[in-house]
Image (cartoon, rainbow, N blue to C red):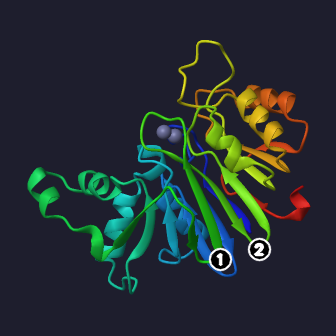
């Protein structure tokens, strides 16, 4: 399983830096996880426009999904469009969310049907997507939001999405080869609960889970990447690094 980071800027895109977007590839199948600001542009730098086989979205905040509006335009109006709809695994309100994001007024929104371009599937159970087994669980964020454990060929990656510390994350991350964890801020006692992880909390999650490797993502442009990494490394003594846009990470036994 190969992870390629399309974008990893937390909460908003930064200068030359897309928000959340990850490419997971195995057995010739291309799964895109998250589709935030700038990710459609980045995807085309990495792969042909219509080469994705499925899209998985943790939640419907703009930095995780807003480029789906542009993907709709591409798949609907491109002179040589793809042959069938793209499967999208997302929270229950995804279709109405994307209709509202795309349509410029109420009349168009009410008449808009996205189903010729996308087929929507709800999250919350185990689904098989190409060669991947995707387990999802509700995490601690102020909207319907999921974390994931994605397995393929005997290796596994857990991804926190956006979440504060919670039991669901511990369960998803238990014993994974790679934990891709958000860390949106440095640790402080007055941080808003059930919203995000600090660098320290990401490290503690990896340590409790016995993860083989910790990859830190979703650091906002206003947060010190160095401080977040320092906190995570203090809490987790395994391999730990900040992901970078365009970075490629093999998920496998060698990552242990
Ligand atoms: Zn976010
Ligand atoms: Zn969020």
Q: Quadrant of the C terminus?
A: bottom right
Assign a secondary structure to mark 1.
loop
Given contact means CB atoms under 8 Å apart, are the residues at marks 2 and 1 in contact? yes
Assign a secondary structure to mark 2.
loop
Q: On the picture, is 231 further left or further right than 190?
A: right
Relative to 78, residue 168 above or below: above
Residue 155 percent coordinates (x, y): 79, 65
Marking on residue 209: none
Q: On the picture, is 32 further left or further right than 231?
A: left
- Ligand 1 near label 1 (Cβ, under 8 Å)? no
Residue 183 percent coordinates (x, y): 66, 34
Residue found at x 48% / y 45%: 145
Q: CA distance from mark 2 to mark 1?
A: 8 Å
Q: Quadrant of residue 139?
A: top right
Residue found at x 36% / y 61%: 70
Residue hosting label 1: 131
Relative to 192, residue 149 above or below: below
Other-residue count near label 2 (Cα within 10 Å), few / some / many at <14 / 14–19 / ≥20: few
**Of residues 11 and 195, the one drawn nearer to the viewer in this rendering:** 195
Q: How many marks?
A: 2
Q: Quadrant of residue 161?
A: top right
């Amino acid at each position: 399983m190969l992870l390629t980071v399309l974008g990893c800027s937390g909460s908003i895109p930064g200068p030359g830096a897309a928000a959340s977007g990850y490419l997971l590839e195995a057995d010739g199948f291309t799964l895109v996880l998250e589709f935030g600001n700038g990710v459609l542009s980045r995807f085309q730098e990495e792969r042909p426009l219509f080469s994705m086989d499925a899209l998985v979205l943790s939640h419907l905040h703009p930095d995780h999904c807003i480029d789906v509006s542009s993907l709709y335009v591409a798949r609907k109006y491109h002179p040589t469009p793809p042959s069938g709809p793209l499967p999208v695994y997302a929270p229950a309100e995804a279709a109405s969310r994307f209709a509202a994001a795309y349509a410029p007024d109420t009349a168009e929104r009410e008449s808009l049907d996205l189903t010729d371009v996308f087929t929507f599937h709800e999250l919350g159970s185990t689904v098989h997507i190409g060669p991947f087994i995707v387990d999802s669980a509700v995490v601690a964020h102020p909207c319907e939001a999921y974390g994931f454990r994605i397995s393929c060929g005997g290796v596994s990656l857990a991804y926190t999405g956006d979440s504060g510390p919670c039991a669901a994350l511990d369960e998803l991350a238990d014993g994974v080869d790679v934990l891709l964890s958000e860390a949106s801020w440095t640790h402080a006692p007055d941080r808003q609960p059930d919203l995000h992880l600090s660098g320290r909390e990401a490290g503690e999650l990896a340590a409790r889970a016995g993860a083989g490797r910790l990859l830190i993502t979703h650091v906002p442009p206003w947060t010190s990447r160095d401080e977040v990494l320092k906190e995570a490394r203090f809490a987790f003594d395994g391999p730990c690094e900040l992901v970078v846009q365009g970075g490629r990470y093999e998920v496998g036994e060698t990552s242990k």
